[in-house]
């Protein structure tokens, strides 16, 4: 028995499924998850000493690679001054100033500890601000596991093959409308029927949680237009895309400014931090300035603020996003070529350093087309890659992440493994 197998056995006796978050259990791809001993740069080493090129990146935060020396120093330095105060500290001001500087649609920002909290709080605020009840989300978009958003969610919920989740009362989701992504007519129809009741539209401006899916030309502009006309708060959930696609996130890349934005993942530099922010008049509605309540014992945690501040400072260096784009384009092109050479039909979707290989002819533009992917074939590809030392996200409906630590050596190793893996699953 390997040490990972032994640990998984012990874990399953005391933790449901043996994991702290469902997708980590490898249910969608079979087999058992390696337990991670350590990680550095683009590589992860498991408890049995096996090294992998990592494309999970802790599901998004690790844009600088693992254990970046500057981030470790910042965390160490902060820790020696105390790990939590439950009182204001300079570090949260420093991070907030960076967020407001880089994401122009955010005039004020409130820190929380997870993306789930960020979206949940943003929607409460949108409802409090507008005095309306209904929210509109998109099929296959994941916004964390808050009750009202756990309907037609992608990511791990998609993998489990259930429409929502037991335990979420029908009444809670009764005010959540769901329409397909990239379908402007469906949005218009929803507004025609429910416009005056719609408090918010929440969207992943580039989807990562149905696998990577880009917005079609004009789509985000259309959402901006119709929400503005109806007095509905447009919320971009940039927990994944924030600081990943550009310093100003997807809204900078596509030039569309939402009313509110949710951030997480990279924001915390690998420690638990997330945030929601936006227009000053909307943010004035949150306590203590306004009546909408939201709070958190560990919010603005100094270690997370220090890690996040340093992660963002590192992203401010010139050429960073060009470098990420170049590496990611090489990888995506190489994967498509390797699949074609082996005679495996795939669609490689990529936006910046987010990418997904779908096992279908494509195009993949929404959750329905994403689900036409052959997930059994994906599972076999995943295992073939893992065996060759490449760790992809262990489910089809997820984005793989390229980091700044992925260099030519890692890309070469990945493409070599992919050539062999596509041939293996084709045969
Ligand atoms: C990861 C993610 C979340 C949830 O964040 P957690 O920190 O896991 O709660 C919300 N929205 C999007 C778009 C995400 O990718």
Image (spheres, helix red, strand yellow):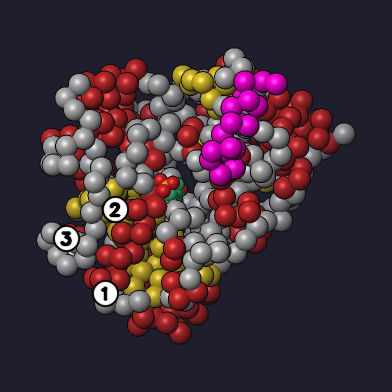
Q: Real-space Cα distance between discs 1 and 2?
A: 17 Å
How busy is the neighbourhood of tag 3: few (under 14 within 10 Å), some, or many (20 plus)? few
Residue at image position (69%, 40%) is 29
Residue identified by numbered label 2:
276
Local crowd size for mark 1, using a 10 Å CA cut-off: few (<14), some (14–19), many (≥20): some
Q: Residue at x 87, y 34 (%)?
A: 427
The quadrant where residue 315 appears: top left
187 or 277: nearer the viewer: 277
Residue 130 bears which disc, if any? Answer: 1
Q: Is residue 308 magenta?
A: no
Left or right placement of residue 227 versus residue 361 in this view: left
Q: Which mark is residue 287?
A: 3
Mark 3 or 2, nearer chain start: 2
The answer, for residue 298, to whether it is visible in the render is: yes
Foreground residue, 20 or 351? 20
Kindly state the secondary structure of the residue where label 1 is placed: helix
The tag earlier along the polypeptide, 1 or 2, is 1
Q: Nearer the viewer, residue 287 or 320?
A: 287
């Amino acid at each position: 028995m390997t040490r990972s197998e032994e640990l998984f056995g012990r874990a399953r006796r005391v933790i449901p499924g043996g994991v702290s978050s469902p997708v980590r259990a490898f249910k969608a791809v079979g087999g058992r998850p390696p337990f991670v001993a350590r990680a550095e740069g683009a590589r992860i080493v498991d408890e049995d000493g096996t090294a992998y090129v990592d494309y999970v990146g802790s599901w998004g935060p690790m844009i600088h690679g693992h254990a970046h020396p500057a981030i470790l120093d910042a965390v160490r330095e902060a820790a020696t001054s105390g790990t939590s105060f439950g009182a204001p500290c300079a570090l949260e001001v420093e991070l907030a100033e960076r967020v407001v500087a880089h994401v122009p649609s955010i005039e004020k920002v409130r820190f929380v500890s997870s993306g789930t909290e960020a979206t949940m709080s943003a929607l409460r605020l949108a409802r409090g601000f507008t005095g309306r009840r209904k929210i509109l989300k998109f099929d296959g978009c994941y916004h964390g596991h808050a009750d009202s958003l756990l309907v037609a969610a992608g990511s791990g919920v998609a993998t489990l093959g259930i429409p929502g989740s037991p335990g979420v009362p029908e009444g809670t989701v009764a005010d959540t409308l769901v329409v397909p992504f990239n379908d402007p007519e469906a949005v218009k129809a929803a507004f025609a029927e429910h416009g005056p009741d719609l408090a918010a539209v929440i969207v992943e401006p580039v989807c990562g949680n149905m696998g990577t899916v880009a917005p079609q030309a004009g789509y985000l502009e259309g959402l901006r237009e119709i929400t503005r006309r109806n007095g509905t708060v447009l919320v971009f959930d940039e927990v994944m895309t924030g600081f990943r696609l550009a310093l100003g996130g997807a809204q900078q890349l596509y030039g569309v400014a939402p009313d509110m934005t949710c951030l997480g993942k990279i924001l915390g530099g690998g420690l638990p931090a997330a945030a929601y922010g936006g227009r000053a008049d909307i943010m004035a509605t949150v306590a203590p300035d306004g009546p909408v309540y939201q709070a958190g014992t560990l919010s603005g945690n100094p270690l997370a603020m220090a890690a996040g501040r340093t992660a963002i400072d590192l992203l401010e260096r010139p050429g960073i996003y060009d470098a990420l784009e170049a590496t990611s384009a090489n990888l995506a092109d190489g994967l498509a070529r390797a699949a074609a050479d082996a005679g495996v039909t795939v669609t490689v979707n990529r936006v910046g350093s987010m990418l997904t290989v779908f096992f279908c002819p494509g195009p993949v533009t929404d959750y329905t087309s994403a689900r036409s992917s052959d997930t059994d074939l994906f599972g076999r590809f995943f295992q073939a890659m893992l065996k060759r030392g490449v760790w992809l996200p262990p489910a089809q409906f997820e984005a793989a992440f390229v980091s700044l630590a992925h260099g030519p050596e890692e890309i070469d190793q990945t493409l070599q493994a992919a050539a062999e893996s596509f041939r293996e699953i084709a045969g």
